[in-house]
Image (cartoon, rainbow, N blue to C red):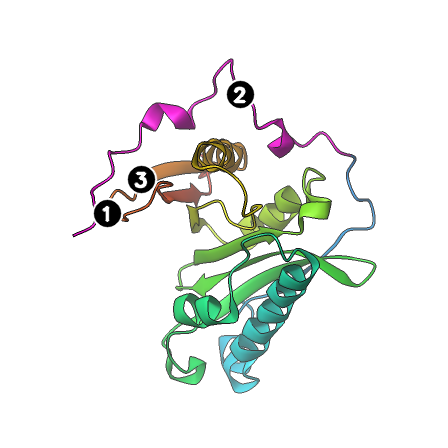
Amino acid sequence: MPEQLPPTDPSIFSPSDSEQDLELVETGEQLTALRIERFTPLDNPQEYRDNDTSVVVFDKFVEFIGELREKYPDRNFPSLQVLFDNTCPAPLRERSCDNAAYFAYLDDNTIGAIFGMDHGDRKLGGQWFVVDPEFQNKRVARELMVAVSADYDTVWITAGAFGENQGRSIEETQSRQAALVRYYKSLGFTIEKVNQSLISEVKPVEMVYKRKQEN
């Protein structure tokens, strides 16, 4: 039986004076030519299904991850099998909910994406939130989230560091994970829980964004 790792200390998800992951701070200039494209069933669910847009969106996202894997062979971007196992567990036409995705482009090249499942009632279960490392710290993730939050009142996402250099130590990955959670907080997310059930040195953190209700 695998050894149970000690619980993650929640304090690592709070800012500290010894913060080392400054690479997650948006210090770079904003990409003025950035373009966001949205795929969501909110406008016309029936047409979305008739056109198999969920399948198109999934294929488009897989293509983007494939490009990242080729561009960064030393980083741990998910394999095609992982994408199918975690994102497409059943034929899309037979599912009761639809894929939704937001893609960020620069000069017609995809540089970021949010991919998830539309659960109705303006709720999105985010499954992947990815930005090309070359274009991180340039407000790409923030602009993607602005687009998503304009459509959805509630967004769930699991914060988990991936796309990292495979030579990173456990301590570096944990520090990166903590910085990632703090960054999601800056986008308006709050922590729901730390997944202690997973036998891993870095625990995924389940987070949620809820649109503030106007008085």
Instruction: Of the two numbered discs 2 and 3 on the same chain, state the one appearing first in sequence.
Output: 2
Measured as percent of width and height from the top left, residue 45 is found at 50, 75
Q: Which residue lies furthest to the top in this view?
A: 17
Q: In the displayed structure, would residue 89 be above or below residue 195?
A: below
Q: What element carries label 1?
A: loop
Task: Return the residue at label 3.
Answer: 194
Q: In the displayed structure, would residue 18 be above or below residue 53?
A: above
Task: Quadrant for residue 118, please give it.
Answer: bottom left
Q: In screen coordinates, is 172 left or right of 62?
A: left
Q: Main secondary structure of the magenta part?
A: loop
Task: Return the residue at label 2.
Answer: 19
Crowdedness near tag 2: few (<14), some (14–19) or many (≥20) residues, C-alpha within 10 Å: few
Which residue is drawn at the image coordinates 55% and 67% (left, top)? Answer: 40
Which mark, by number, is residue 156? none
Give the magenta range: 1-28
Q: Which amino acid does label 1 sit on?
A: Ser
Q: Distance between the residues labelled 3 and 1?
A: 9 Å
Q: How far apart are marks 2 and 3 (CA)?
A: 20 Å
Whether the magenta-drawn stretch holds residue 100 is answered as no
Measured as percent of width and height from the top left, residue 76 is found at 54, 54
Q: In screen coordinates, is 51 left or right of 8?
A: right
Which residue is drawn at the image coordinates 44% and 64% (left, top)? Answer: 117
Whether the magenta-drawn stretch holds residue 11 is answered as yes
Q: Which amino acid does label 2 sit on?
A: Glu
Task: Return the residue at label 1.
Answer: 197
Q: What residue type is labelled 3?
A: Val
Between 39 and 202, the one nearer to me in the picture: 202
The nearer-to-camera label among 2 and 3 is: 2
Q: Is mark 2 on a helix, strand or loop?
A: loop
Crowdedness near tag 3: few (<14), some (14–19) or many (≥20) residues, C-alpha within 10 Å: some
